Image (cartoon, rainbow, N blue to C red):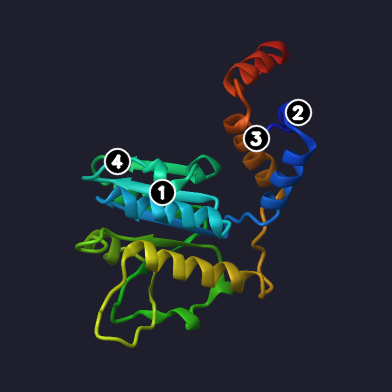
Amino acid sequence: MGNEALVEYLLNFITEERKTTLEKVLINRTKYISVLLEDIYQPHNASAVIRSCDCFGIQDVYVIESRNQFQPDKEITMGSDKWLNIQRYSGKNSVLNCMQKLRDQGFRIVATTPHKDDCSLPDFDIAKGPFVLMFGSELKGLSSTALENADEYLKIPMYGFTESLNISVSAAIILQYFSMRIRQLSVSWPLTNEQRTEVLELWLKRSIKDGKRIVERWHSVHGQ
């Protein structure tokens, strides 16, 4: 949960111009759509997806590291990763644990892959409720565990000889389309007041010089 008093304190350490920029981005952030990356072994592709998430207002990214550990490529993310909530899951049953946690929070788990029960991008029911888009590795796609436990399946319509797109391209296409559509439909996509405070606190902590020391000093004074 965000701490409103701490946020008000931290706002004193940035310029009015910076405040305006943060507010402009904050009002367009969403948790209605989230992204899950499963064992992406090429860091430049995963990093490109991270950058797309920031560009299209996606706040939460979940990374499963059953075999491959994700290390953002700073030249590709261009600092976009510091504005996102990136939660990592590793170890045994990491796929199922992550999926169950998201489902318990009310998300639909959507596998991005051609499937016998798949839905084409324009036909996907966005208004049905919040959802998480799962993207798999470049070579094999999503694991059988992820596919067998997904709630829905999504594909991008294609009309050429090539059967698939690079993961970063797929993510950019899907996120751009859905970020546009949620703003056209009557869905509760903006952050709640509590979520806005939480996200703004995260941004301020990560962007203010000596932010960690300033936060520690505030907590020592206020006993929190």
Tell me if I can see residue 81 in this picture.
Answer: yes
Q: Which mark is residue 5?
A: 2
Image disc number at residue 201: 3
Q: Are marks 1 and 2 in contact (CB under 8 Å)?
A: no
How far apart are labels 2 and 4 at the CA level?
34 Å
Relative height, residue 122 to residue 113 (above, below): below
**Residue at image mark 4:** 90
Q: Nearer the viewer, mark 4 or mark 3?
A: 3
Q: Percent position (x, y) of residue 3?
A: 69, 31
Q: Residues within 10 Å of mark 3 (few under 14, many from 20)?
A: many
Q: Amino acid at mark 3?
A: Glu
Compute the Cα span from label 3 to label 2.
Answer: 10 Å
Residue 5, quarter of picture: top right
Three-letter amino acid code at the position of disc 2: Ala
Which of discs 3 and 1 lies nearer the camera? The answer is 1
Q: Measured along the vertical axis of the image, is residue 61 above or below residue 148?
A: above
- Residue 213: x, y in percent? 60, 16
Residue on which disc 1 sits = 76
Name the kind of residue labelled 1 in the image.
Ile
